[in-house]
Amino acid sequence: MVKEITTYQDYTSAINSSRKVLICFCAVYCAPCRKIGPSLDALQKEFQNKALIYKVDVSLVPRAMAEQNVEAMPCFRGFVGGKVVFANTGFNLLKIKEFLK
C-alpha cells in the first residue's frame, strides 16, 4: 500500500531520498484521486525495488502543494535527489511507468 505523507517534514524527507520518488498530490474529496488508489498500490508493488511512491493530501500539506504549483488533482511529481525530473497532471500510466523504470 502506498504510504500517505501528512506533514511537510515527512514530505521533504521523502523527496530527498537517494531513490527515485513519485509523489501523488491528491485529496480525500477528489473522486479521480480515490479511483486511482488501487493503480498506485499496483505500481508500488511493481516498482518497489526501483522507486518510492507516496500520496500527499493537499489539505494536510498545503505548503508542498504550493511549492509544486499543484492546480489540479491528481498531480504527480517525480524526484531524483530532491529535484523534480517528472511532472504530470492527471493519471497517465504510461508516462508514470516510464519515469519509474
Image: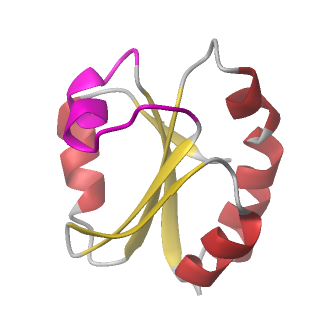
Residue 47 among those drawn in magenta:
no
By secondary structure, the bulk of the magenta-drawn segment is best described as loop
Residue at the extreme bottom of the image, as rendered = 101
Position above or below: 65 against 81? above
Which percent across, then down, holds residue 11?
A: 27, 43
Residue 64, quarter of picture: top left
Which percent across, then down, holds residue 25?
A: 47, 38
Residue 62 among those drawn in magenta:
yes
Residue 10, quarter of picture: top left
The answer to whether 52 appears left or right of 63 in the picture is: right
Which percent across, then down, holds residue 17?
A: 27, 68
Q: Quadrant of the C terminus?
A: bottom right
Q: Give the residue displayed 81% in from the left and 33% down from the top.
A: 35
Total marks in image: 0
Q: Give the residue displayed 69% in from the left and 52% down from the top.
A: 91
The answer to whether 90 appears left or right of 71 in the picture is: right
Position above or below: 40 against 65? below
Colouring used for the render: secondary structure
Q: Nearer the viewer, residue 15 or 45?
A: 15
Q: Give the residue displayed 42% in from the left and 31% down from the top.
A: 71
Q: Give the residue displayed 62% in from the left and 83% down from the top.
A: 98
- The span shown in magenta is 59-73
The answer to whether 67 appears left or right of 31 in the picture is: left
